[in-house]
Image (tube, helix red, strand yellow):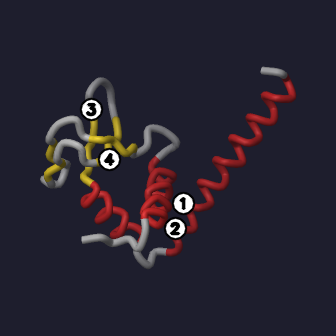
């Protein structure tokens, strides 16, 4: 079941979700080189895009199929403008921080 009208809407909510989690590591799209099963038991076939997030040390990785990620994002952000607004503000603040660091680096020649 597709919960998003477009890839742009999906991408926007994925960026919001990543902003709420932490600066790093974030959920990253990955093309499956073999079959997997995600955290919720959904099958990920070879060649499909799934989402993964490292945690801890070594090979500690959470995997979500596209379907599972859509469901997670839908549950978190559907008609939840307060949380969406908070995530958008975090994204804006981080972009401002990055811009300031880049400007500072250019001024000092580093």
Q: Secondary structure at mark 2?
A: helix
Q: Is residue 87 above or below residue 50?
A: below
Tag 2–tag 1 contact (CB < 8 Å): yes
- Real-space Cα separation, disc 3 to disc 2, in angstroms: 28 Å
Q: Residue at x 44, y 57 (%)?
A: 14
Mark with earlier residue (1, 3): 3
For the C terminus, the image quarter is: top right
Q: Secondary structure at mark 3?
A: loop
Q: Is residue 66 above or below residue 99?
A: below
| Residue that mark 3 sits on | 60
- Real-space Cα separation, disc 2 to disc 4, in angstroms: 20 Å
Label placed on residue 87:
1
- Real-space Cα separation, disc 1 to disc 4, in angstroms: 19 Å
Mark with earlier residue (1, 4): 4
- Badge 3 density bin: few <14, some 14–19, many ≥20, Cα 10 Å: few
| Residue that mark 2 sits on | 84
- Real-space Cα separation, disc 3 to disc 4, in angstroms: 14 Å
Q: Residue at x 29, y 48 (%)?
A: 50
- Badge 1 density bin: few <14, some 14–19, many ≥20, Cα 10 Å: many
């Amino acid at each position: 079941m597709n919960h998003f009208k477009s890839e742009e809407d999906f991408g926007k909510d994925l960026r919001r979700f990543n902003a709420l989690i932490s600066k790093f590591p974030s959920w990253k799209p990955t093309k499956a080189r073999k079959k997997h099963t995600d955290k919720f038991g959904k099958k990920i076939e070879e060649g499909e895009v799934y989402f993964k997030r490292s945690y801890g040390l070594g090979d500690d990785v959470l995997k979500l199929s596209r379907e599972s990620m859509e469901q997670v994002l839908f549950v978190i952000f559907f008609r939840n403008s307060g949380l969406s607004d908070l995530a958008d503000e975090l994204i804006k603040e981080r972009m401002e921080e990055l811009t300031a660091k880049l400007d500072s680096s250019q001024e000092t020649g580093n």
